[in-house]
Image (cartoon, grey):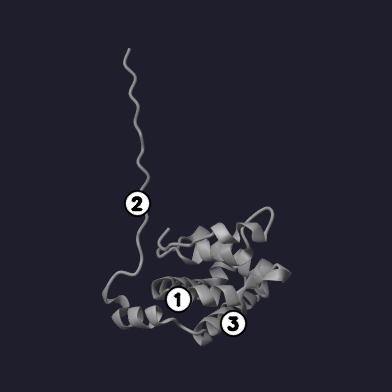
Amino acid sequence: MCHTLRLGHRLELHPLTLSPADLLLTKLQVFHAEAKDLSDSAALLLGCGLGAEGLGAIDTDYIAGLLGSDWGFWRTATGTLKTLEMRAEQVCAGEELASVLRRHIDELLHVLERAPRSLAWRMRSMIGERSPWYELPEEPVTNHFSTTS
């Protein structure tokens, strides 16, 4: 994971899985989003829609609050959303669904743009991209076992 996403206090929101907002954030926090990350994000945005947490939708207020306190996470998430918007037709394999996806992305980006930002967010934004704002995950270490006869 490229950013820290604390989920402990949110595990009880849904009995079987993370909330749609938390699932989306796990995908949007990936700095080098791959095709699977983009298609998973698209599936969440199209399948759940945007709205209030209690309705099973992606809770935009929660996402805006979280990203409004962390410039780096905000930068990665908005960058991933913009990448998904550019590749919407490829990810959706058709213009009709891609149009709906773009509408959801635009709405979420609009919410994020209007959201209040913490002092820490504003201070970090002054540094911008001159300093790394994400951590690249380490490659898993593979154990090689040798057998001798």
Query: In the displayed image of the protein, which residue is found farthest to the top?
Result: 149
How far is mark 1 from mark 2, CA to CA?
25 Å
**Dot label at residue 69:** 1
Query: In the displayed image of the protein, which residue is found farthest to the bottom?
Result: 114
Amino acid on which disc 3 is placed: Glu
How far is mark 3 from mark 2, CA to CA?
33 Å
Amino acid on which disc 2 is placed: Glu
Assign a secondary structure to mark 3: helix
Q: Earlier in the sequence, mark 3 or mark 2?
A: 3
Amino acid on which disc 1 is placed: Ser
Instruction: Estimate how packed mark 3 is, as few (under 14), some (14 to 19) or many (20 or more) residues with alpha carbons within 10 Å.
Output: some
Assign a secondary structure to mark 1: loop
Q: Nearer the viewer, mark 1 or mark 2?
A: 1
**Dot label at residue 145:** none
Residue position for label 2 = 138
Query: Where does the image place residue 139, in percent across and percent down from the top left?
Result: 35, 48
